[in-house]
Image (cartoon, grey):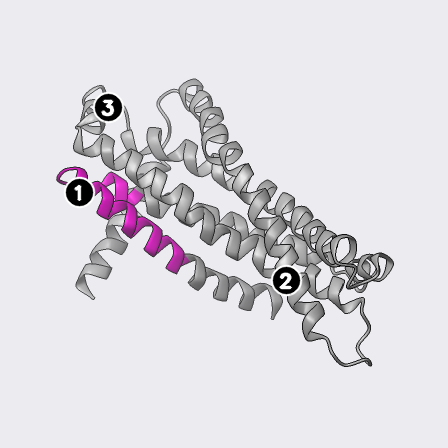
Amino acid sequence: MLEFLYNTGRYIWFLGKVFSKPEKWRIYIRQLFLEFEKLGINSLGIVVIISIFSGGVISLQTAYNITNPLIPTYMVGLTTRDSIILEFSSTMLCLILAGKVGSNIASEIGTMKVTEQIEALEIMGINSAAFLVLPKIVAFVFIVPILVVLSMFFGISGGYFVVSVASHIVNSENFIYGVHYAFQPFYVTYSLIKSSIFAFLIVSISSYYGYFTTGGALEVGRSSTKAVVYSSIAILVANLLVTQILLS
Protein backbone atom coordinates (compact mmCIF):
# COMPACT_ATOMS: atom_id res chain seq x y z
CA MET A 1 0.00 0.00 0.00
CA LEU A 2 2.82 2.40 0.87
CA GLU A 3 4.56 1.55 -2.39
CA PHE A 4 1.36 2.26 -4.32
CA LEU A 5 0.95 5.67 -2.63
CA TYR A 6 4.63 6.44 -3.21
CA ASN A 7 4.43 5.60 -6.93
CA THR A 8 1.15 7.50 -7.31
CA GLY A 9 2.61 10.63 -5.75
CA ARG A 10 5.80 10.40 -7.80
CA TYR A 11 3.75 9.78 -10.96
CA ILE A 12 1.73 12.97 -10.32
CA TRP A 13 4.96 14.90 -9.68
CA PHE A 14 6.38 13.44 -12.88
CA LEU A 15 3.34 14.60 -14.90
CA GLY A 16 3.75 18.09 -13.46
CA LYS A 17 7.32 18.12 -14.73
CA VAL A 18 6.28 16.75 -18.13
CA PHE A 19 3.62 19.43 -18.69
CA SER A 20 5.78 22.37 -17.62
CA LYS A 21 6.45 25.11 -20.17
CA PRO A 22 8.90 24.00 -22.89
CA GLU A 23 12.18 25.87 -23.28
CA LYS A 24 12.03 26.04 -27.10
CA TRP A 25 8.81 25.23 -28.93
CA ARG A 26 10.61 24.63 -32.24
CA ILE A 27 12.57 21.68 -30.85
CA TYR A 28 9.43 20.14 -29.36
CA ILE A 29 7.49 20.47 -32.62
CA ARG A 30 10.28 18.77 -34.56
CA GLN A 31 10.35 15.97 -31.98
CA LEU A 32 6.56 15.72 -32.22
CA PHE A 33 6.64 14.79 -35.90
CA LEU A 34 9.30 12.17 -35.23
CA GLU A 35 7.04 10.62 -32.58
CA PHE A 36 4.09 10.63 -35.00
CA GLU A 37 6.08 8.37 -37.27
CA LYS A 38 7.65 6.20 -34.58
CA LEU A 39 4.57 5.62 -32.43
CA GLY A 40 1.77 5.95 -34.97
CA ILE A 41 2.78 5.11 -38.51
CA ASN A 42 5.00 2.22 -37.42
CA SER A 43 2.01 0.71 -35.59
CA LEU A 44 -0.27 0.86 -38.63
CA GLY A 45 0.66 -2.58 -39.97
CA ILE A 46 -0.13 -4.51 -36.79
CA VAL A 47 -3.38 -2.54 -36.34
CA VAL A 48 -4.61 -3.46 -39.83
CA ILE A 49 -3.64 -7.14 -39.58
CA ILE A 50 -5.13 -7.67 -36.12
CA SER A 51 -8.33 -5.79 -37.02
CA ILE A 52 -8.98 -7.77 -40.20
CA PHE A 53 -8.54 -11.16 -38.55
CA SER A 54 -10.38 -10.19 -35.37
CA GLY A 55 -13.32 -8.89 -37.39
CA GLY A 56 -13.38 -12.16 -39.31
CA VAL A 57 -13.33 -14.23 -36.12
CA ILE A 58 -16.08 -12.15 -34.47
CA SER A 59 -18.35 -12.46 -37.51
CA LEU A 60 -17.72 -16.21 -37.82
CA GLN A 61 -18.42 -16.86 -34.15
CA THR A 62 -21.61 -14.81 -34.34
CA ALA A 63 -22.79 -16.56 -37.51
CA TYR A 64 -22.14 -20.07 -36.16
CA ASN A 65 -23.87 -19.32 -32.85
CA ILE A 66 -27.05 -17.98 -34.41
CA THR A 67 -28.96 -21.25 -34.80
CA ASN A 68 -32.46 -19.97 -34.08
CA PRO A 69 -34.29 -19.43 -37.41
CA LEU A 70 -36.28 -16.60 -35.80
CA ILE A 71 -33.10 -14.50 -35.47
CA PRO A 72 -32.46 -12.61 -38.74
CA THR A 73 -29.07 -13.10 -40.41
CA TYR A 74 -28.41 -9.37 -40.50
CA MET A 75 -27.69 -9.67 -36.77
CA VAL A 76 -24.26 -10.98 -37.76
CA GLY A 77 -23.37 -7.62 -39.30
CA LEU A 78 -24.92 -5.69 -36.41
CA THR A 79 -23.08 -7.74 -33.76
CA THR A 80 -19.78 -7.48 -35.62
CA ARG A 81 -20.17 -3.72 -35.94
CA ASP A 82 -21.03 -3.11 -32.29
CA SER A 83 -18.37 -5.50 -30.96
CA ILE A 84 -15.65 -3.81 -32.98
CA ILE A 85 -16.75 -0.22 -32.41
CA LEU A 86 -17.60 -0.47 -28.72
CA GLU A 87 -14.81 -2.68 -27.43
CA PHE A 88 -12.29 -4.16 -29.82
CA SER A 89 -11.08 -1.11 -31.74
CA SER A 90 -10.67 0.95 -28.58
CA THR A 91 -9.94 -1.26 -25.58
CA MET A 92 -8.47 -4.43 -27.06
CA LEU A 93 -6.42 -2.54 -29.62
CA CYS A 94 -4.99 -0.24 -26.94
CA LEU A 95 -4.10 -3.26 -24.80
CA ILE A 96 -2.14 -4.60 -27.76
CA LEU A 97 -0.49 -1.21 -28.33
CA ALA A 98 0.39 -1.08 -24.63
CA GLY A 99 2.58 -4.12 -25.24
CA LYS A 100 4.17 -2.78 -28.41
CA VAL A 101 4.43 0.96 -27.77
CA GLY A 102 4.61 0.87 -23.96
CA SER A 103 7.54 -1.53 -23.79
CA ASN A 104 9.33 0.43 -26.51
CA ILE A 105 8.95 3.73 -24.66
CA ALA A 106 9.98 2.30 -21.30
CA SER A 107 13.06 0.59 -22.72
CA GLU A 108 14.07 3.67 -24.72
CA ILE A 109 13.83 6.10 -21.80
CA GLY A 110 15.15 3.49 -19.36
CA THR A 111 18.25 2.97 -21.48
CA MET A 112 18.81 6.73 -21.61
CA LYS A 113 18.48 6.81 -17.83
CA VAL A 114 20.98 4.05 -17.04
CA THR A 115 23.49 5.44 -19.58
CA GLU A 116 23.19 8.90 -17.95
CA GLN A 117 21.89 10.60 -21.09
CA ILE A 118 19.00 12.08 -19.08
CA GLU A 119 21.45 13.56 -16.57
CA ALA A 120 23.35 15.09 -19.49
CA LEU A 121 20.16 16.80 -20.68
CA GLU A 122 19.52 18.18 -17.20
CA ILE A 123 23.08 19.54 -17.00
CA MET A 124 22.48 21.39 -20.28
CA GLY A 125 19.44 23.06 -18.68
CA ILE A 126 16.85 21.02 -20.55
CA ASN A 127 13.75 19.70 -18.78
CA SER A 128 14.42 16.07 -19.68
CA ALA A 129 10.95 14.81 -18.68
CA ALA A 130 9.15 17.35 -20.85
CA PHE A 131 11.58 17.00 -23.77
CA LEU A 132 11.39 13.20 -23.86
CA VAL A 133 7.80 12.55 -22.83
CA LEU A 134 5.57 15.48 -23.84
CA PRO A 135 5.98 14.98 -27.64
CA LYS A 136 5.24 11.28 -27.16
CA ILE A 137 2.03 11.97 -25.23
CA VAL A 138 0.76 14.59 -27.70
CA ALA A 139 1.62 12.47 -30.74
CA PHE A 140 0.07 9.27 -29.40
CA VAL A 141 -3.09 10.94 -28.09
CA PHE A 142 -3.67 12.41 -31.56
CA ILE A 143 -2.67 9.35 -33.60
CA VAL A 144 -4.49 6.62 -31.65
CA PRO A 145 -8.03 7.82 -32.54
CA ILE A 146 -6.97 7.68 -36.21
CA LEU A 147 -5.71 4.13 -35.72
CA VAL A 148 -9.00 3.28 -33.97
CA VAL A 149 -11.06 4.55 -36.91
CA LEU A 150 -8.90 2.53 -39.31
CA SER A 151 -9.33 -0.50 -37.04
CA MET A 152 -13.11 -0.10 -37.16
CA PHE A 153 -13.07 0.00 -40.95
CA PHE A 154 -10.75 -2.95 -41.43
CA GLY A 155 -12.43 -4.97 -38.67
CA ILE A 156 -15.89 -4.67 -40.21
CA SER A 157 -14.43 -5.20 -43.69
CA GLY A 158 -12.66 -8.34 -42.46
CA GLY A 159 -15.92 -9.67 -41.04
CA TYR A 160 -17.73 -8.94 -44.30
CA PHE A 161 -15.06 -10.65 -46.37
CA VAL A 162 -15.00 -13.80 -44.22
CA VAL A 163 -18.74 -14.48 -43.83
CA SER A 164 -20.08 -12.94 -47.03
CA VAL A 165 -17.37 -13.15 -49.68
CA ALA A 166 -15.18 -16.11 -48.71
CA SER A 167 -17.59 -18.51 -46.98
CA HIS A 168 -21.02 -17.18 -48.11
CA ILE A 169 -22.50 -17.88 -44.67
CA VAL A 170 -24.40 -14.59 -44.69
CA ASN A 171 -25.76 -12.84 -47.74
CA SER A 172 -23.80 -9.65 -48.56
CA GLU A 173 -26.92 -7.48 -48.56
CA ASN A 174 -27.98 -8.79 -45.15
CA PHE A 175 -24.54 -8.23 -43.63
CA ILE A 176 -24.34 -4.66 -44.93
CA TYR A 177 -27.91 -4.02 -43.77
CA GLY A 178 -26.95 -5.23 -40.30
CA VAL A 179 -23.95 -2.89 -40.25
CA HIS A 180 -26.26 0.06 -40.98
CA TYR A 181 -29.15 -1.08 -38.81
CA ALA A 182 -29.89 1.07 -35.71
CA PHE A 183 -26.46 2.69 -35.88
CA GLN A 184 -25.64 5.02 -32.98
CA PRO A 185 -23.03 7.65 -34.01
CA PHE A 186 -22.27 8.32 -30.33
CA TYR A 187 -20.71 4.84 -30.11
CA VAL A 188 -17.89 6.06 -32.35
CA THR A 189 -17.45 9.19 -30.24
CA TYR A 190 -17.41 7.07 -27.11
CA SER A 191 -14.77 4.81 -28.58
CA LEU A 192 -12.56 7.74 -29.64
CA ILE A 193 -12.79 9.34 -26.19
CA LYS A 194 -11.79 6.06 -24.58
CA SER A 195 -8.87 5.54 -26.94
CA SER A 196 -7.49 9.04 -26.28
CA ILE A 197 -7.56 8.40 -22.52
CA PHE A 198 -5.92 5.01 -23.00
CA ALA A 199 -3.22 6.54 -25.20
CA PHE A 200 -2.36 9.05 -22.47
CA LEU A 201 -2.16 6.28 -19.87
CA ILE A 202 0.06 4.08 -22.03
CA VAL A 203 2.64 6.77 -22.76
CA SER A 204 2.67 8.45 -19.34
CA ILE A 205 2.90 5.22 -17.32
CA SER A 206 5.50 3.68 -19.63
CA SER A 207 7.56 6.87 -19.57
CA TYR A 208 7.30 7.02 -15.79
CA TYR A 209 8.77 3.55 -15.32
CA GLY A 210 11.46 4.20 -17.91
CA TYR A 211 12.40 7.58 -16.42
CA PHE A 212 12.92 6.19 -12.92
CA THR A 213 14.88 3.11 -13.98
CA THR A 214 17.98 2.51 -11.88
CA GLY A 215 20.76 -0.02 -12.39
CA GLY A 216 21.62 -1.64 -15.69
CA ALA A 217 20.20 -3.58 -18.61
CA LEU A 218 18.35 -6.04 -16.37
CA GLU A 219 16.44 -3.21 -14.68
CA VAL A 220 15.53 -1.77 -18.11
CA GLY A 221 13.83 -5.07 -18.93
CA ARG A 222 12.00 -5.04 -15.62
CA SER A 223 10.85 -1.46 -16.22
CA SER A 224 9.48 -2.47 -19.64
CA THR A 225 7.56 -5.34 -18.05
CA LYS A 226 6.13 -3.09 -15.34
CA ALA A 227 5.16 -0.51 -17.95
CA VAL A 228 3.13 -3.04 -19.94
CA VAL A 229 1.50 -4.60 -16.88
CA TYR A 230 0.50 -1.39 -15.11
CA SER A 231 -0.58 0.44 -18.24
CA SER A 232 -2.79 -2.55 -19.14
CA ILE A 233 -4.33 -2.52 -15.66
CA ALA A 234 -4.89 1.24 -15.91
CA ILE A 235 -6.61 0.75 -19.28
CA LEU A 236 -9.00 -1.83 -17.85
CA VAL A 237 -9.87 0.34 -14.84
CA ALA A 238 -10.31 3.44 -17.01
CA ASN A 239 -12.46 1.43 -19.44
CA LEU A 240 -14.84 0.54 -16.61
CA LEU A 241 -15.04 4.11 -15.33
CA VAL A 242 -15.43 5.77 -18.74
CA THR A 243 -18.09 3.26 -19.81
CA GLN A 244 -20.03 3.88 -16.61
CA ILE A 245 -19.84 7.65 -17.12
CA LEU A 246 -20.56 7.87 -20.85
CA LEU A 247 -23.04 5.02 -21.40
CA SER A 248 -25.01 5.09 -18.15
Q: Amino acid at mark 1?
A: Leu
Q: Position of residue 117 (x, y in %)?
A: 21, 25
- Labels 2 and 3: the sequence-earlier one: 2
Measure the C-alpha gap from mark 1 to mark 2: 39 Å
Q: Quadrant of residue 144?
A: top right
Identity of the residue drawn at 68% across and 68% down: 62
Tell me where the magenta segment starts and ends, as one range.
Answer: 208-234
Reading the image, the residue beneath label 1 is: 218
Q: Which residue is mark 3?
A: 121
Q: Amino acid at mark 3?
A: Leu
The verdict on residue 215 being magenta is: yes
Question: Which mark identifies residue 11?
Answer: none
Instruction: Locate residue 199 relative to residue 212 in the image: left or right.
Output: right
When the figure is inspected, residue 209 is found, relative to residue 174, above or below; the finding is above
In front: label 2 or label 3 = 2
- Give the label, 1 or 3, closer to the camera: 1
Please rate how many residues cluster around mark 3, counting C-alpha atoms within 10 Å: few if below 14, some from 14 to 19, many from 20.
some
